[in-house]
Amino acid sequence: MATRIDFLNNNRALYQPNHDRVLVDVPPSSCWPSTAIGMCLTGGFALAMAVEPAVLAPVVSQPGLPAPVTARKRAALGLDTADLAQVKARTRRGLCVLGLRFSADRGCPAERFQRLRRELGDGS
């Protein structure tokens, strides 16, 4: 019951700000509780996996997808609206999402983390 990431066969997430989780097959809820860690290009995958109740601690580190080539994509999270709504509901029920980025990282712009704070809260 491992998570499958199909990155090589489908690169449209590089260009689409709100793709429909085509890159991540989420493990079934019967899996053991787990942590999801994504870094750089896979940084946002942990957020996509947070729709699954088995994921108790998503770590979003330098999420680089979708590629930040326009203003809209710099703030994009790479989730469709239904998945974002599920993650928001889970954070309201206590899920903590840890987000990390280097302050001068152009591949993971500040706008993306501003949106994460706006959508999920700032943890206070």
Image: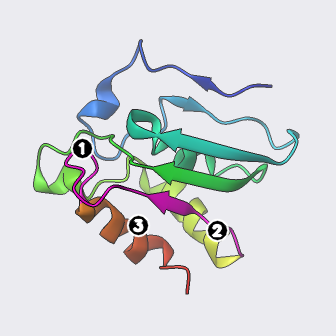
Q: Amino acid at mark 3?
A: Leu
Quote the CA–CA distance across marks 3 and 2: 12 Å
Viewed as shown, does residue 31 lie left or right of 3? right
Q: Tell me which amino acid carries mark 1.
A: Gly
Residue that carries the numbered disc 2 in the rendered image: 96
Comparing 10 with 37, the one in front is: 37
Mark 3 or mark 1, earlier in chain? 1
Q: Is residue 116 a member of the stretch shown in magenta?
A: no
Q: Residue at x 33, y 22 (%)?
A: 11
Eye-nearest disc, 3 or 1? 1
Please give the range of residues in magenta: 94-109
Q: CA distance from mark 1 to mark 2?
A: 24 Å
Q: Which residue is mark 3?
A: 116
Among numbered discs 3 and 2, the one appearing first in the sequence: 2
**Residue at horizontal 38 percent and vertical 76 percent from the top:** 118
The local secondary structure at tag 1 comes to loop
- Secondary structure mostly seen in the magenta stretch: loop
Q: Element under label 3?
A: helix
Relative to 76, residue 16 above or below:
above
Q: Residues within 10 Å of mark 3 (few under 14, many from 20)?
A: some
Percent across and percent down for residue 116 are 41, 66
Pinpoint residue 27: horizontal percent, then vertical percent.
73, 35
Q: Position of residue 110 (x, y in %)?
A: 25, 63
> Which residue, given by chain and number where applicable, does mark 1 sit on?
107
Sequence-earlier tag: 1 or 2: 2
The crowd level at tag 2 (other Cα within 10 Å; few <14, some 14-19, many 20+) is: some
Residue 118 in view in this figure: yes
Report the residue that reaches farthest toward the bottom: 124
Looking at the rendering, in which quadrant would you find the C terminus?
bottom right
